[in-house]
Each structure stands twice: as C-alpha cells, then as structure tokens.
Amino acid sequence: MKSVLEYLENSAIKNPEKTAVLDDKEKSSYSELLAISKTIGAGLLEHVTPGEPVAVFMKKSVITLQSFFGIVYAGGFYCLIDPDFPVERIDNILSVLQPKVVITSEENREKLSETLFEGNVLIAEKLRGYPVPASKAEGTEIPVSNIEISKEAEASFAKIREEEKPDHPLYCNFTSGSTGTPKGVLVAHDTVISFIDDFTELFNITEEDVIGNQAPFDFDVSVKDIYSAMKVGATLVIIPTAFFRFPNNVMDMLEENKVTTLIWAVSALVLLNRLHEFMYKVPPCINKVLFSGEEMPVKHLNDWMDQYPDATFVNLYGPTEITCNCSYYVIEERYAEGEKIPAGHPYPKKQIWLMNDGKAFPLRERWHAEGVTDEVSSDEVDDPSPTGEIVVTGIGPALGYYNNPEATEKAFINLTLPDGSTARAYKTGDLGYIKGGLLYFAGRADFQIKHNGHRIELEEIERALNSLPEVSQGACVYDTEKYRLVAYYTGTEDKKAILEGLKKKIPEYMIPNVFRFVEDIPLTKNGKVDRKLLKEL
C-alpha cells in the first residue's frame, strides 16, 4: 500500500452507506466521503502540483476532512492552520509553508484576508458544490449518486498515484519553535500506514467502533482518529473544540453517537473529570481510552477507571516527529498517587534507544522490522538503565522539518548502533530510563515542555513577552505540580495590557496561566535566568 487513500477506498467498497464521519452539523457516508473528496480533488488539479503543500484554513469538521482527502487525490499534502491563531502566528506558518493555494470556508475568508497571503484562495463549499448546513437537524441534500468525476480527472488521479512513492508527503503539522518561527513536521504516507496498521491491530479497533475525536486536526493525535477509522471502516465523530468549554455538550455527543473509543490528550480527560462531568452522565458505550500528550495524573486515571472498569486504558508516548507514537503501555493494574505510569513498549516496527555518554541502550533485546531481526545481547541492557535521551529508529521518523534543513539536520541523525551499523533516527529531546523492560519518561532535556497536549518552546513565549512595551524583562517557567505556565516580568504591573498583547502574538494554549510581577529577574552566576529560583518563588 502506497497511499492512505486506499483505506478510504476499501472502506467505501465494503460499507458504502455506513456513516464515515459526522460533526455537529453534518455527516457523510463512506461513498459520499469518497465522491466528495474526489470532487474537491478534481477542482484542485489545475492549482496543485504533486508534492506541494496546500494550507487548509478551517476548524476541524466534515468538510475539512473532505478537503484533506481532496488535496491528497490532487497529489499535494495538507496542512491545517487554525483560524483562531493570532495573525502573526498564521503569517509565520505561511512564511515557512509557502503554499500557492489556501483552502478556506466562507466564515473564515475575512480572517484570512488579514494575513499576508497573496496566493490563490479557494472556498471549500464551492469546491464540493454545497454549503455547510446551519445544524444537523437542517440536513443537506447531497446528490452523491449524481456526482460524476470526469474521465480526465480520474486519469489524472491514476497517474498521480502511479508516480507517487511511499515516502510521498501526506501532511505537515506545525509545532512551537525555539527561534520564534514554528517548525513544520513533514510526515509521509508510508510511516502513517505502518503506524496505523499496527495501532488498530494492537488495540483491536474494528469497524464496530465509533471513534470520538477530541484533538484539533493540526495536532497529530487526530491522525490516529482519522486513519484508524478509515482503515477499519469505523465511524469518526468530530467533537467541536468549542464543546470542551461547555463539557455537558461533549458528554451528550459521546452518548448520542454511542462512542466506543477515545484517543485523547491527557488534558481533555482531566478536564472532564475535574469538572465532575460523570455526575452529569456516564456515556455507556466507551470501551477503549487511549491517552497521550503529557503524564496522566494517577488520581484522574483512577477516577476514569472507576467509571469504566471493563474498558481498556492505554498510555501512549511519542512526539510528532516519529509519527504519532513510539511506545505504549496497556494499564492492567491500579496505580497509587505518586507512582509513575510506564511509557511502555516500542511499537512493532520502531526501536527505542537511550543515549547516555555516547552509548545507545536499547529498550528491548529483539527488534523486528520488515522481517529482519536485529538481536542485541542482554548484557548490553542495564535494568534499570541510566537516564538518557530517548532516540527512535525504525519505521516512523518524519521526513524532517519543512523548509528547515538546519533544524532537520540537528534532530534527525544517523545513529550508530551497537553492532556498528547505522540507522536514521530522531532525537526526541525527552529523557527516559528503562526499568523492568519498560520505558519510563523522565522529563525534557531542553527548554521544551508539553502543556494541555501541546508541545511548547518556552523561549517562544518569552520572546513574545519581552517584545511587549509593558515588559522590561520576562521569563517563563512550567509548574509541573499544578500543570500551568507561569510568567515572571519586570516593567509595568498592567497585567491586562500584557495579556492582551500576548493574545496578538501567540496561540491561546501558549498564554501563561499565571502572571507575576517581580522587581528583578534572578540570574545565575553565568548571567542566565535562574529558573530554579523562579520556580521556588
């Protein structure tokens, strides 16, 4: 298999009338999703050269997913840009991506006009031929049986597919960058296919499942939702991000659609539990809860397990750059507060190493990759191992950072293995150790943190903070006990002005939770910000 489109096509053949995807306004069967995706793809053929990026300037929705697949049919790769981002952030992403085409919706056209983009703007509703309904109750007339893709378009699709290689790019997700410029992680079809094939098998995701999507479509957790559903022919329920501000709506949507599977960021699970949503209702069909993004607080995990004693709970670990996850741990016992939940085992086609003092410690003794077994003698594996940087090889590392060869060269390396051979690897910047044959996460090696499921460079927040006229000097730390970003600053004490200024420069999820005015920012003897002392404050 060379293209993820085969997932969609196979499911459309097997279950054409089954609901493939729905949101709060509309739904699409597999046959409809296929036909409309091809319609959008046909409309893009004259605008997109295979291998080029197409930005999708929309919130997640049914029409957004149709646009993704349309882009892939036209040979491009997609990149979702959230319209709620500050204009400066949007311009930074566009400056890296440099797309010739942006697909947007009628409601987001005005916001796009505020950016510096001067290329071709296409309206999604016009590409597919009908508008988004005001509500699901209103319904839509989708004459799918009347949709005909021209022979010329079908021939173009076939030619594109024939010429594509498995490492053809599929999507680009942007993460925070230490220089203030976001980094675009470019991921190929083959690594997604390899991951999803293992993911659905390991966790028994089948066509009987209904997957409740929580993650935004520019967050790689959503890749597991989308392509797991497409592969097995499950139904994907897109829960609007806005619903999480009024979580009763989330619980209603889970119940009404008989959702069975949650592949969510830890912060979303914690939110529902912290707001006592289970006192409102307990959606009855959930049987799988898989979580990632940051460490799951044991207290909240146990509360979820109390509500769903027969469900499967899985801790997932891995950064965007290794295609979704590199390790997993199925939780089969209760943990006491203060205990650490393992990051677990590597996926079948991925190998995890810990780099310490120039030596590579493998996570397990045997590694299977495409039928080849690489054996590492057990005397090379200390258990517990020294703490080291987590490095990932095998099928999974991304193609690199788009239009950023310097950052790519720094993070994606050729790792020398104990037997003297080399393998392409990604240096995660995370620290870990091996205990009992399992990987344990031990924090960040650099200045990057995970907050509410998002990877954030604290330097990017500081850069925005220090650019404000009200701030003489600013610094940002992460409070790991209370899961919050704390900004310290000198200058004026006008916190409201500082908050409003940051909202124009960085996304909402990067805005500090706490602002503290100080007379001076403490420095170390080397003249650097004394972050240890700040945390003690």
Image (cartoon, helix red, strand yellow):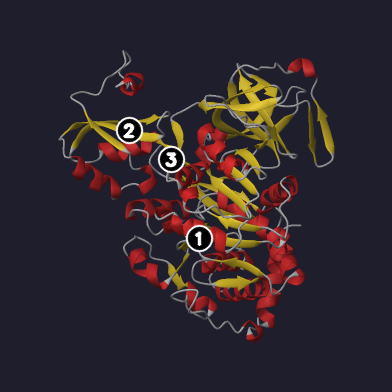
Task: Give the labeled residue for mark 3.
Answer: 177
Task: Please tell me in which quadrant of the rendered image residue 374 appears.
Answer: top right
Is mark 2 in CB contact (under 8 Å) with mark 3?
no
Task: Give the labeled residue for mark 1.
Answer: 252
The residue under label 2 is which amino acid type?
Answer: Val
The residue under label 3 is which amino acid type?
Answer: Gly
**Front-lying residue, 233 or 36:** 233
Q: Is residue 149 above or below residue 167?
A: below
Q: Tag 3's secondary structure?
A: loop
For marks 1 and 3, give the CA distance.
37 Å
The label nearer to you, 1 versus 3, is 1
The label nearer to you, 2 versus 3, is 2
The residue under label 1 is which amino acid type?
Answer: Asp
Q: Is residue 67 above or below residue 366?
A: below
The spot of residue 406 in percent (x, y) is 50, 38
| x 33%, y 53%: residue | 86
| x 73%, y 66%: residue | 11
Q: Tag 1's secondary structure?
A: helix
The label nearer to you, 2 versus 1, is 1
Question: In this rendering, does residue 200 appear at all?
Answer: yes
Question: In this rendering, does residue 80 appear at all?
Answer: no
Q: Is residue 146 above or below residue 78?
A: below
**Front-lying residue, 347 or 141:** 141
**27 left or right, relative to 346:** left
Which numbered marker is on residue 486? Answer: 2
**526 left or right, relative to 196:** left
